[in-house]
Image (cartoon, helix red, strand yellow):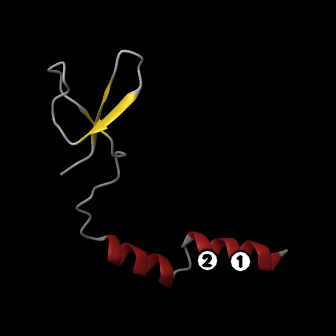
Amino acid sequence: MYLMYYLDENKNRIYTMAKVDPFGRPTFSAHPARFSPEDRYAKERILIKKRFGLLLNQTANKAIKEE
């Protein structure tokens, strides 16, 4: 199941799990383009970033130590 949204009369996002809004129009995906809830390779991606020191917490520590 994916999180979806539709716009109301005031252009506010209303989040739902339905594929159709109350007006009969299709809803939009609320996920960013590169995000998928069914990410099969997230574990491997994190392991590679740990190995090469590319995680955000690893890069922040290096910048502080260099100063």
Amino acid carrying label 1: it is Lys
Residue carrying label 2: 58
Occupied quadrant, residue 27: top left
Asked if residue 28 lies left or right of residue 62, the reply is left
- Name the amino acid type tagged 2: Gln
Q: Nearer the viewer, residue 28 or 8?
A: 8
Label 1 sits on a secondary structure element that is helix
Which residue is drawn at the image coordinates 33% and 41% (left, top)?
A: 30
Query: How far is mark 2 from mark 1, CA to CA?
Result: 7 Å
Local crowd size for mark 1, using a 10 Å CA cut-off: few (<14), some (14–19), many (≥20) = few
Decide: marks 2, 1 in contact (CB < 8 A)?
A: yes
Residue 42 or residue 27, whichever sits in front = 27
Query: Which residue corresponds to the image point at 26% horizontal and 64% vertical from the top-left?
Result: 39
Q: Residue at x 36, y 15 (%)?
A: 9
Counting from the top left corner in percent of width and height, residue 8 is at 34, 21
Asked which secondary structure carries label 2, the reply is helix
Please provide percent x and percent y for residue 63: 74, 72
Residue that label 1 marks: 62
Task: Give above or below for 50 relative to 55.
Answer: below
Dot 2: few (<14), some (14–19), or many (≥20) neighbours within 10 Å?
few
Q: Is 31 positioned to the left or the right of 51 in the image?
A: left
Quadrant location of the C terminus? Answer: bottom right
User: Could you say which is closer to the camera, residue 38 or residue 2?
Assistant: 2
Q: Is residue 22 left or right of residue 36?
A: left
